[in-house]
Image (spheres, coloured by chain):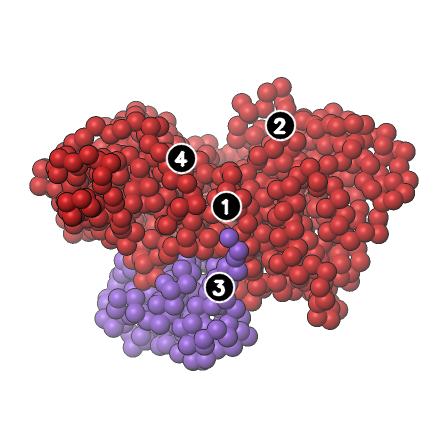
Chain colours: A purple, B red
Amino acid sequence: MARLNINGQNRDVQVAADTPLLWVIREQLGLTGTKYGCGVAQCGACSVHLNGEVVRSCSMRVGDVRPTDRIVTIEGLSPNSSHPVQRAWAALDVPQCGFCQSGQIMAAAALLRKTPRPTDKDIDEAMTNICRCGTYQRIRAAVHQAAGNGNSGTSGRANRKS
Amino acid sequence: MTKIHDTTRDISRRNFIVGSAAVAGGGLALGLDLPLASAQQAQNAGNEVGIWVVVKPNNDCVIRIARSEMGQGTLTGLAQLVAEELECDWRRVSTEGLTPGQNLARKRAWGDMATGGSRGIRGSQDYVRRGGAVARTMLLQAAANEWKVPVEELTVSNGTITHAKTKRQTNYGRVAAAAAKLTPPDPKSVKLKDPKDWKVAGKPMKRLDTADKLNGSKVYAIDIKLPGMLNAAIKDSPVYGGKLKSIDDSKAATMPGVRKIVRVGDSGVAVVAETWWQAKTALDALTIVWDEGANGKVSSATIAQHLETGLTATETNGERREGDALAAIAGAAKKIEATYSTPFLSHACMEVMNATVRLTADKAECWTPTQNLEASLAALSSASGLPLTQCEVYRHDLGGGFGRRGGTQDYVRKAVLVAKEFPGVPVKTIWSREEDQTYDFFRPISMCKFSAGLDEKGNLVGLHVRVSGQSINAWLNPAAMAGGRDMRQLQGYWAEPGDAQLGYAVPNLLIEYAMRNTHVPVGPWRGVNTNQNGYYMECFIEELARAAGKDSLEFRRAMMAKYPKHLAVLNAAAERGDWGKPLPQGVHRGIAQFMGYGSYSAATAEVSVDAQGKVKVHRMVLALNCGHAVNPDQIAAQVEGSVAYGLSAVLYGECPVENGRMTSLNFDTYQIVRLAEMPKVETVIVPTGDFWGGVGEPTICVVAPAVINAIQAAIGKPVRSLPLKNVKLV
Ligand code: FES
Ligand code: FES
C-alpha cells in the first residue's frame, strides 16, 4: 500500500513496495502516457517530474516515494497541451512515432524550469533521452523555441530546394 | 449503407474503443461485429462517397488510411494526396484507419495494407488519388442533379461548390448524402491533376497526428486497457532453435498476482498475471533449463569464419557480370584489394513487441503494433484456428517499426498461444526490452571482398565484388529464391534501372553473392541491404579515388555519365554540402551516393577525429530525388531520422553472438545516438517529377559511407568494419 501525490491528486495504491514507479503509474494509476522503453534508466521514455526534477520512473521503487512528494506525469504537465514545450513541439512537428515524446517533453520542461534560456550545450547535457525515430534536430530547435531563444538554435526545418 | 464506425472528428477509433471499455465496462461492438448503424447514426457519422472519403454534414472530410503509421508520416501524405483530388478544405480533414477485417469484408477494396519497403505512398498514390477524384466527381454530380445544371458548369474550391451562372453555392457536407447514393465512376476513368497544379500535396503541411503525442493521450497497443484484461511476460530460448527442457515454477507460481505459467510452443514460457510487473517478476523467478542444441556453440568468431569461406569460395548465389573483371584486374597497372564487414543489428523500436489477444469460441481479436495488418490477421487466424472472417486486428499506430513488424508476425502468434489459456479473457503479452532484443529479426551480418584494377591514368578498369553473408529471403521467404539464387542481398548493385541500381559504369564488372546463413533470424531493417552494400561500395570507391590520386567527387562523376539521375543528386549534395570549399581546422569532408527504394540519394558529411580517436559528426547534407515530394517537411523529418538511425549503426551498433545467444540486450550495451551526437542535418530535395520513389529508407544508405569517407579524409586510412566503437582510429 502506498499513497502517491500524482498530478495534484492523492491516490492510494495496493502494490508491492519494490514495484517501479513507472509500472504503478501505468498499471495501477492507468496513466499510460508515461512509457516503458528499457527499464534500466537508459532511454528516458519513463521520465516524470518528482518535486519538479525530471526522474526516470522505471528505476525508482514506489516504496521510496513519500506521500508528500509531488509527481507530475505528461498528463498533468498542462491543461490543453498549453505548456510552452508542448506548443513548440506542435509548431515544429517534432514527433514521429511519438513513443518517446512524453519523456522528451518532460525532460525539456524540467530543463527550462531550471535554465529558462538554455544554450546548445545545456540542451546537449539535459536532453539525453533516446528517440529511435531520430527527432533530435527538431527537439533542439523546439527547446530553443519554447525558451523564446528566437533563431539562435539550429533550425529544425529542411533546407530545401524544390 | 454500412458505416465503418463513428467518425467523430478528433476521436480516433482506438480512443473510442478504450473509452467505451472504460466507461461501459464491456459490451464492445467492434469491427466486423459492428451492427449496421441506424440511419440517424449514419447521418452523424457522415456519408461514404466512394471508398476513401467520408463527408460529414458539417462539411468535414474523413479520409481513410489503409497503410500503417509508425512515425514516417505516411498518414498525412496519403491524406494530402486524396484531399488534393477531392478539392476539400484541408483544415477540415481528419483520417480514420481501416482494419484488415473491414478490408476483407469489402473484398480488399482498399488494397494492400502492408507498410514496408518505403511503399506506403508510392505504392498507393495512384489509387488513393483516384479515390479522391472519384469522390469529387460524385459530390459535384450530386450538386448538379440538385440544381439541374450540367456538371461541367460547376467549379469547386475548398469543398465549396459554385455554379457561377446562377450564382449558387453549396458545400460538400450538404450534398454528401445525395452523392453517397450515386454509382461511383470507374476510378480508371477519372483524370488526375498534373502535380504542377498541386495545392495541398507537395506542400509542407503539418502532420495530422501530432496532438495526442504531446499530452500522453495517444493509445499505443501497449497502452490498451480492456475489461478483465490479464498481462503476460514472455521468454524464449536465448539460443535460437533451442528448446525448453524443464521449468521449476515452485517459487513463481505462488507469487502475487500470478494466474498461470504457460509453455509457449516448445521453446518459450510466459507468466500470466494481473499486472505486467507481477508477470515479469515471476518470470524472472522461474528456473528454466534449456536444451540449447548445437547452436549453443556458435559465436561471433565462428560466424566470421563461416562468412570468410564465402569470400574465397567460387560458387555464387547470384551475380552480375559485365566484361571480364578478373582478367582486367590481372592486367591492370594498379591493383587494390580490401575486405569490409558489418555486424548483426537489432531494430530496437521504442515500443517493445506486444500484442493483446482475446479468444472466444467464434471470435479472435488482436490489438498490436503492426506494419502489416493483414499479415497480423493471417497470423491470428492460423494460430487461433478460426477462419479469417472471424478474426479482427485493431489498428494502433506503432511506436516505431523499421521493418521489425512486417511479415514476421511471431509476436502475434505467440500472444495467441498465451491467450488460448484464458478463453474470453483479453491477455496482453509484452516483451521486456531484453526479450525484444533477444528475439529480433536482425539486419543480416555480411562481409564484402573487393578487388579492383586501375589503369595508368587512374581509371577503374575492372571491379570484382564478392558479398558473403546471411540471406533475408532464406529466412523469411525461401520461395523468392528460385534455384538458390538471391539477388536481394546485392540490393543497390543491380543493373536494372528504377529501384536499386548501381550508379557507376565499370567496363569489367563482376558482383557475386555467396550465401552464408547462420542460426540467427534475419529480416529487413530500415534500408535493408542498401545499408551494408552502400557502405562497402562507397567506401571502397573512396579508396580507389585515393589510390588514383583523384578528387573523390571527380572520380565518381567520371563513371556516372550513363546515370544522370544518380549524378544529379550527387551534384546537389556536393554543391549544397560545399564540396571543395575550406573547412575549419581539423574538420574533414566525405561524400557518397547510392540508390534504393526507387529513390536516388547522396550525402556529404563534415567530421572531426580528436587525438583520442573520438569522432564528431558536425554537419551532414543529404540530397534526395524521390520523384514526387508529397510533403517536403516530412521528407526532411525522414532524412533527419535516417541520419540518427544510420549514425547509431556507424558509431555503436552491433549484436554480438556468444554461446549461441545475443549479448546486446538493452540500451546500456546496444547504444543509440543521443541528441548531443546528432549532427546538423540539411535536407536537399531535388524531385524530378517523373517517377514515384520511396522516402523512409533511401537516404540511410549514404549516411555510413559519407561519415566513414570523411574519417578517411581525416586519418588517411579506410575504416573497413563497423561499428566505430571497435575500431582504433588513431
Ligand atoms: S524506461 Fe526508464 S529510462 Fe528507459
Ligand atoms: S518519435 Fe519515435 S522514438 Fe522518438
Going from the N terminus, do you reach mark 4 or mark 1 first? 4
Mark 3 vs mark 2: give the one in front: 3
To the question of a shared chain for discs 3 and 2, the answer is: no
Which residue is at the front of the view, B608 or A65? B608
Who's the residue at 89% across and 37% down the image? B332
How far apart, in angstroms, are the residues tagged by discs 4 and 2? 30 Å
Question: Does mark 2 fall on the same chain as mark 4?
Answer: yes
Image quarter where the C terminus of chain B lies is bottom right
* CB within 8 Å, label 4 to label 3: no
Residue B716 horizontal/vertical position (percent): 80, 58
Q: Secondary structure at mark 3?
A: loop
**Of pointers 4 and 2, the one earlier in the residue sequence:** 4
- Quote the CA–CA distance across marks 2 and 1: 25 Å
* Separation of marks 4 and 1 at Cα, in angstroms: 17 Å
Compared to B282, does A147 lie above or below? below
Give the labeled residue for mark 3: A156
Q: Which residue is mark 1?
A: B695
Q: CA distance from mark 4 to mark 3?
A: 31 Å
Q: Amino acid at mark 4?
A: Asp
Tell me where residue A69 appears, x and y as whole percent. 32, 76
Q: Gap in Å between the C-alphas at discs 3 and 1?
A: 18 Å
